[in-house]
Amino acid sequence: MARVPVYQRQLSTAPISAPRIQPDIADTSGLTQGLNDATRAATQIALEERAKADTAALMSADQQLAEWKQQTLFGTDGVYTRRGGQALDITGQTLPAFDQKVSELEEGLRTPAQRERWSIIKRNQREALSNELAKYEFGQREQYYDEVAEGQRQTAIQNAKLYAGEPGQVAYNLSKLQAVEGAEAQRKGLPAELAEQQRLASTSRLHTAVVDQLASRDPSQARTYFLDNSLGMTGDDQLKVRTMLQPLVDRQVGTQAGVSAIGSSNAPSDRIFSSIIQAESAGRQFDARGVPLTSKAGAVGIAQVMPATGPEAAKLADLPWDQERFQHDADYNRALGQAYFTKQLNNFGSPLLAVAAYNAGPGKVQEWIKQYGDPRKGEISEAVFLDKIPYQETRDYVTNVLGQAARQHEPSFGEIAQAIDGRTDLTLTQKQYALSAAKDRLEWMKAEQKQTDDQNLEQAWNVVLQGQSYAAVPSQVWSALPAKARKDLMEYRPVTTSDPEVYYRARDLVVDGSEVNLLGMRGKLSDTDFKELTRLQQDRRQRGAEATSAIGTTDEMFKDALRTAGINPNAKAGKADAKKVASARRYVDTQIQALEQAGGKKATREQVQQVIDNAFIEGKVPGSGFLGFFSTTQHNFDRAPGEALNVTDIGQVPRLEKQQIVAALQRAGRKATDAEILRLFNEANQ
């Protein structure tokens, strides 16, 4: 509560109606004292009110400054939203703004006391802000430099990885990486041991990246790089790289070993030269008299090398020329011949031209190339070039050699596996990879050879089917055909009726989805059946099982009937069961076609089953035995037109027909005995 001056208290207690009394001199001293007290009280109140106002103004300014600082530091675009390089000069940018804000707020302070107090506040606030900004800026500066250094590291590592196969580029980027690590260690003032650890960690990252890149292209090269640079990698990275590389290297080494085993066991050039040896001397160094085998032209030995060519061939084989060994050592003579053939193969770049050069001489081959065109440049096909060779002997020689080489025995998987297993330089894992690669390679080679054989066979048949003689088939194609295909072409005569065994066996295979060489069966198929099977096979390839589903369903029913009758549905052509299968097929197909033509629609499954059941009914055919004196047991499909089939086993009567006969007998009031049923059934089916 505010103090009440004495004079106010006195006035307030005096009665209003009391007469005014003039005090005497002694009484005025109390009044004066009261007035002084009132003045001092008022002054004190004023001072207090002024102090409150000063404090409120300072508090307001301080509050506004705090709000500005809060917004400046934590606002949407505040100090703490700036990272890395954006914060490097944040102190220099923020303190001037702070000073400006302080000046603005200072204008609202009027009294010296306010300003004096404000100067203390702003000094403390500025110092605190400056310290906070400096600390933040230092942290961001270090982070920024760390990010820059990491960016430089990653650039060096990525460039080294990009040029992993170029040692100079890798070394250049490695030196850049080491320079970055040196600068970082100096900036941070790292001790030597810690600096070395960081340098090793970075170089290890680079080496690991290079190994990864090389491993994707050439694991062996990656392993070599790793062995050369493993000392510049951490122990953990070394372990990871070894673990990653080993299976890749095993796979690469094993795969190469598998492919190499096939190539070395039966290389095309080796097969060709082996065919040359057979064509030249039948593999003999001496004739029947034990004298070195010598041709009319003077060629000697197993490889039939001319004496004048011998010294040159010996030089090519990296062997000393030895006349005595040339005549009496088959291995020496063969080595000379192979070296000479290899030279022709390298010079001409074509097996056909090289074989022709071995027989007629390289000079003659060059003449023919100039005269007829170069098959290597596409000026003429090899087949046409071969046919144009003017020497019949050389034409036959080239045809026989290349044909024999193409038909030579391919290495078996067992032979390859044995060769791989005998290698001591491969680990067990690498041998497993080698075996797998060799198997895949052999399958691929067989598929490639089959495709080539199919193409040659198709080309040869196209010639013959156009009415030309098999002699018109190009020599190169003819020589590459297997013996059976050549025999089929030579014996081909157009047929009007297909061999039923061949036709139905081919159709079964097509329906099952097997790839059938119809051209190989061409000589035993009529044009109509060949075209039908060709269309069916193409349809099966394109649409799958759906294309032959109807035939397939009938076939399964038919095969079930064959098995029930004790006939092998998959019997090979020529076997007794194969003839029965073909005869039954023909009977069933004929009956179904007649049924469909009569009804004008596709036969139902039940109708097909009825036809098949009827085909396999078994009975006695009178007069079918020796000289017609005996009866033989046959199926319905076996009997010739006009022959009767007497069924004696009630179990052979189809269920549906048996039910119909029984119903007819019952309607006629007759007893349905087995004998009566068989009699009526036989009468109806003659």
Image (cartoon, helix red, strand yellow):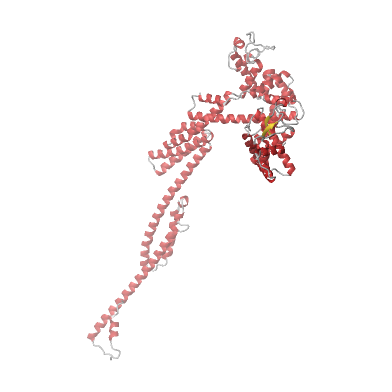
- Front residue of 202/413: it is 413
Residue 58 against residue 525 in the figure, above or below: below
x and y, in percent, of residue 358 in the image: 67, 18
Task: Locate residue 535, reporting x and y percent.
Answer: 70, 37
Q: Nearer the viewer, residue 85 or 327?
A: 327
Relative to 621, 32 lies left or right: left
Q: Position of residue 389 (x, y in %)?
A: 73, 21
In the rendered view, tell whether residue 358 sits above or below residue 645.
Answer: above
Snapshot quadrant of residue 471: top right
The quarter of the picture where residue 531 lies is top right
Left or right of 314 in this view: 593: right
Q: Is residue 503 above or below residue 40?
A: above
Nearer to me, 482 or 114: 482
The quadrant the C terminus occupies is top right
Return the residue found at the far left.
26
The residue nearer to you, when weighing 9 against 476, is 476
Screen quadrant of the N terminus: bottom left
339 w.r.t. 463: above or below: above
Q: Is residue 211 visible?
A: yes
Question: Would residue 178 be visible to someone looking at this image?
Answer: no
Residue 156: where, in percent of width, then height? 49, 40
- Count of labels in the image: 0
